[in-house]
Image (cartoon, helix red, strand yellow):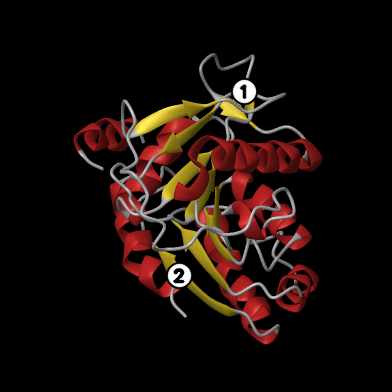
């Protein structure tokens, strides 16, 4: 993932969320081009470690949000780099930091489900406060890798109409029960993409897709033989289904 982030150095909404009551800005708002010192910048999140944000440099219209929750021994900036490569330059990519691991300096995991949900919502509020009208209102894409996928399911259940499109990478398939699928569908969740690059999740992917479709959710799965890291083969596989994920 560090390779992906380094390669991307050459590249480059929350109105519907309960954490913000701002109205969505007009598409013809005549915004000044969004300028930053880099395609990837830190974002102060009150009460938590700074998040990473891949910004849509030069944007003159409101842009949607993709949220990426990292794995168990990961870094937010690595996820932001991978997801910028997947989704292209158009959206904001917001990557909460999580909890620093004392046993692995420089790597992060997650706290409790409640802490993770609170951190994500504070990060969304901070993103809206910093970038204002450049942030589009309405639903977001929520992606999770490994344990981050399990966190994504728990968060999406709280407000499916806002966290309406999920990408669960190398994790979350066992947490995606028939009951969770029904809750997501009842709350107007839209689509789920299951992504598997390791044996541990392959056994559960078909069942997870079945639960989603039975509940009335549009769902699909992609897999590769590459192993766990979210690097080029998995990135290409997800990129190939991204237009489907955000489609009508």
Q: Is residue 213 left or right of residue 83?
A: right
Q: Nearer the viewer, residue 20 or 221?
A: 20
Question: Is residue 246 depicted above or below 108 in this figure?
Answer: below
Tell me where residue 141 appears, x and y as whole percent.
53, 59
Question: What is the x, y in percent for residue 62?
Answer: 43, 55
**Foreground: 164 or 210?**
164
Q: CA distance from mark 2 to mark 1?
A: 29 Å
- Which residue is at a point 29% across and 48% down the rendered structure image? 232
Badge 2 or badge 1: first in the primary sequence: 1
Q: Residue furthest left?
A: 10
Mark 2 nearby-residue class (10 Å; few <14, some 14–19, many ≥20): some
Q: Which residue is mark 2?
A: 246
Q: Residue at x 47, y 26 (%)?
A: 42
Q: Is residue 53 left or right of residue 175?
A: left
Q: Which residue is at a point 70% across and 83% down the rendered structure image?
A: 215
Q: Which quarter of the figure is the N terminus placed in? A: top left
Residue at image position (66%, 41%) is 120
The residue wearing badge 1 is 49
State the SS at label 1: loop
């Amino acid at each position: 993932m560090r390779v992906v982030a380094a390669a991307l150095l050459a590249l480059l909404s929350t109105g519907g969320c309960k954490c913000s009551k701002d109205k969505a800005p007009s598409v013809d708002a005549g915004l000044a081009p969004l300028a930053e010192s880099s395609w990837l910048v830190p974002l102060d999140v009150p009460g938590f470690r700074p998040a990473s944000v891949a910004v849509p440099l030069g944007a003159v219209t409101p842009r949607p949000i993709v949220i990426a929750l990292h794995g168990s021994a990961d870094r937010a900036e690595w996820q932001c780099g991978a997801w910028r490569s997947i989704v292209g330059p158009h959206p904001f990519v917001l990557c909460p930091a999580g909890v620093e691991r004392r046993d692995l300096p420089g790597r992060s995991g997650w706290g409790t489900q409640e802490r993770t949900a609170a951190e994500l919502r504070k990060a969304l509020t901070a993103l809206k406060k910093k970038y204002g009208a450049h942030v589009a209102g309405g639903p977001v894409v929520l992606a999770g890798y490994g344990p981050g996928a399990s966190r994504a399911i728990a968060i999406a259940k709280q407000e499916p109409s806002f966290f309406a499109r999920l990408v669960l990478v190398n994790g979350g398939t066992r947490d995606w029960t028939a009951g969770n699928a029904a809750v997501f569908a009842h709350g107007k969740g839209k689509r789920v993409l299951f992504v598997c690059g390791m044996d541990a999740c392959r056994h559960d992917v078909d069942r997870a897709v079945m639960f989603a479709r039975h509940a009335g959710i549009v769902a699909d799965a992609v897999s590769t033989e590459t192993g766990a890291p979210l690097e080029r083969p998995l990135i290409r596989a997800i990129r190939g289904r991204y237009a489907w994920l955000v489609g009508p």
